[in-house]
Image: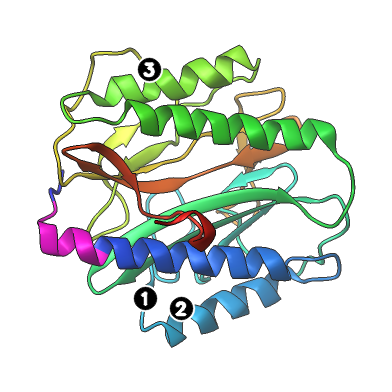
Amino acid sequence: MVEILSPTELERARRAGALVADILQALKARSVPGTNLLDIDRQARTMIAEAGAVSCYVDYAPAFGRGPFGHYICTAVNDAVLHGLPHDYTLADGDLLTLDLAVTKDGIAADSAISFIVGGSDRPESAAMIRATERALDAGIAAAVPGARIGDISYAIGSVLSAEGYPINTQFGGHGIGSTMHQDPHVPNSGRPGRGYRLRPGLLLALEPWIMEDTAELVTDADGWTLRSATGARTAHSEHTIAITEDGAEILTLPKALRR
């Protein structure tokens, strides 16, 4: 299903996106060496409830996972990249942590992910990976204009990642979003321009470039959810929910300091 939002629904989407961004930034500030992933999950649960929102993850049970997910945020550390199931792990200085959060507020969902290095360690290769996903996300957003096609976004994202020398996995990628978290169209992180669904004002997309340092192959943890690099290499993941408007893409999940 491809869902096109009305102006009233788009206003609700803006509020949902701002909430997701604010929770992520608060959790990032609390994710210091010595923090347990389960504490991050509990904090996410509290903030979602206090905002009158609903987690998109806790009851999520797709075919590719061992559902329901049962937690409120995805926490992926180092070689984990997607669907990181919170567990009893204490963060250490230099860990590469990805927080991925999706909530529904007033009937509209928003989804975002951030990757960062925990503590004060200098990890230039990890920092470069994070920057590559952020640049690829920026390129995908710039390509998301009315009349363009999904392939234009995929091509823009993939061109940045390929130029940086990272292998690209297209099994998991961006997606439509609206009254539910995962909708059509699928937005691979590489593709051919001029192909796929044509973008229309009112369409919401969650764009999410993610990479593994030296492989495109994923393996699944025994928990049935967490996806890791097959080689044990580090990973990075950046995601925003955007709305297609007459003037181009509007980023709904910007941190407060960057919002207009």
Task: Look at the picture and state if 21 lies above or below 166.
Answer: below
Task: Look at the picture and state if 98 lies above or below 232.
Answer: below
Residue 60: in sight, yes or no? no
Within 10 angstroms of label 1, few (less than 14), some, or many (20 or more) residues?
A: some
Residue 119 coordinates in the image, percent (x, y):
84, 57
- Front one among 24 and 257: 257
Counting residues from the start of the chain, the first of labels 3 and 2 encountered is 2
Residue 205 as seen in the image, left or right of residue 257: left
Task: Look at the picture and state if 17 lies above or below 58.
Answer: above
Residue at image point 24% right, 30% down: 145
Within 10 angstroms of label 2, few (less than 14), some, or many (20 or more) residues?
A: many
User: What secondary structure is the magenta-colored segment mainly?
Assistant: helix
Q: Which residues are magenta?
A: 5-12
Which residue in the structure is indicated by mark 3?
A: 191
Magenta run includes residue 11: yes
Which residue in the structure is indicated by mark 1?
A: 54
Residue at image point 58% right, 33% down: 133
Task: Look at the picture and state if 103 lies above or below 212.
Answer: below
